[in-house]
Amino acid sequence: MSSTSLGKAINRGLRAAMDHDPKVVLMGEDIGALGGVFRVTDGLQKDFGEDRVIDTPLAESGIVGTAVGLAMRGYRPVVEMQFDGFVFPAFDQIVTQLAKMGNRSAGHVRLPVVVRIPYGGGIGAVEHHSESPETYFVHTGGLRVVSPSTPEDAFWMIQQAIACPDPVVFLEPKRRYWDKGDVPEGAVLRADDDAPRPFNTARVVRSGADVTMLCYGPMVRTCLAAAEAAAADGTADVEVVDLRSLSPLDLPTVMDSVRRTGRAVVVHEAPLTLGLGAELAARIQEGCFYHLEAPVLRVGGFSAPYPAAKIEDEYLPDLDRVLDAVDRVLAH
């Protein structure tokens, strides 16, 4: 094991997948010689060549459309949308072609394409560089949607996404690119059970007895900090669940936790209106009604365009807003 940043862990995962399978190709704007805006693909074009790490024109729809064609010919393309807000020119290709081709062909045509999207705020950027578009893709049948929160998960999950026979939207929490954690040296995913945990499962990252806190991606670190703060002042013993997979959801893990604690708080950066928290609240109400001691509460971004960088801290959920939700759910 070695201490590695989340961004470098994705780089190592991409490298391992490319070493293992010559059909894996990378495509995106500035991902080659530059190594990507966040340097996540740094050094890969040098080592694997311009035929496998391809700098594309600034045309997101063309990037995904080309990936669809390559996948039909047996390749496993991994495409990068340079920022979350730049994915929308490719939205039509993703939701009308990539997501539906398998069903349209009765399973005869599979499209193992990974769409990498750096997402979320917290880096002092403007609106089209700080958005959280996950529910657009979660709403679309035929897509898997995942988001790692740690370097170890990033390393394994990018390999699992590439190996998956279905199209995967791989959401990378950009403000966590520099967070460090232990990643195995020389590990390669040859079968799904090589990874520490299955691709579509949630993970309890902190056990607790009073409240279940459901989160993913950039908010996992924030929620863990809130849970430790609540424990330090004796407010509550908070269980933190990292969803990891947003579609499909690991509902058994979620339900098991909520049935034990009787209370749930969902935290995400995306706006609350029709965010993933709304779906989780509805599912928990259906599956845990007689175990709930309080309504399911949600903490998220506001239903407004992403603000100027100077005030993004007022928009994003922080420690105080999460702890306030814990206080409110315990007050019932």
Image (cartoon, helix red, strand yellow):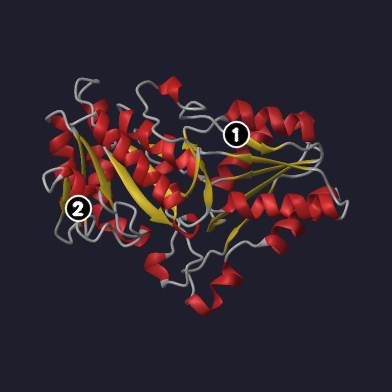
Q: Amino acid at mark 2?
A: Ser
The disc placed on residue 203 is 1
Picture residue at 13% right of the left edge, 37% below the top: 69
Picture residue at 40% right of the left edge, 50% below the top: 8
Residue 274 makes an appearance in the image: no
- In the image, 180: left or right of 125? right
Above or below 34: residue 227: above
Residue 50 percent across, percent down from the top left: 12, 48
- The residue closer to the viewer here, 122 or 301, is 122
Residue 105 makes an appearance in the image: yes
The disc placed on residue 12 is none
Q: Amino acid at mark 1?
A: Arg
Q: Classify mark 1: helix, strand or loop.
A: strand
The answer to whether the residues at label 1 and label 2 have Cβ atoms under 8 Å apart is no
In space, the residues marked 1 and 2 are separated at their CA atoms by 34 Å
Above or below 148: residue 36: below
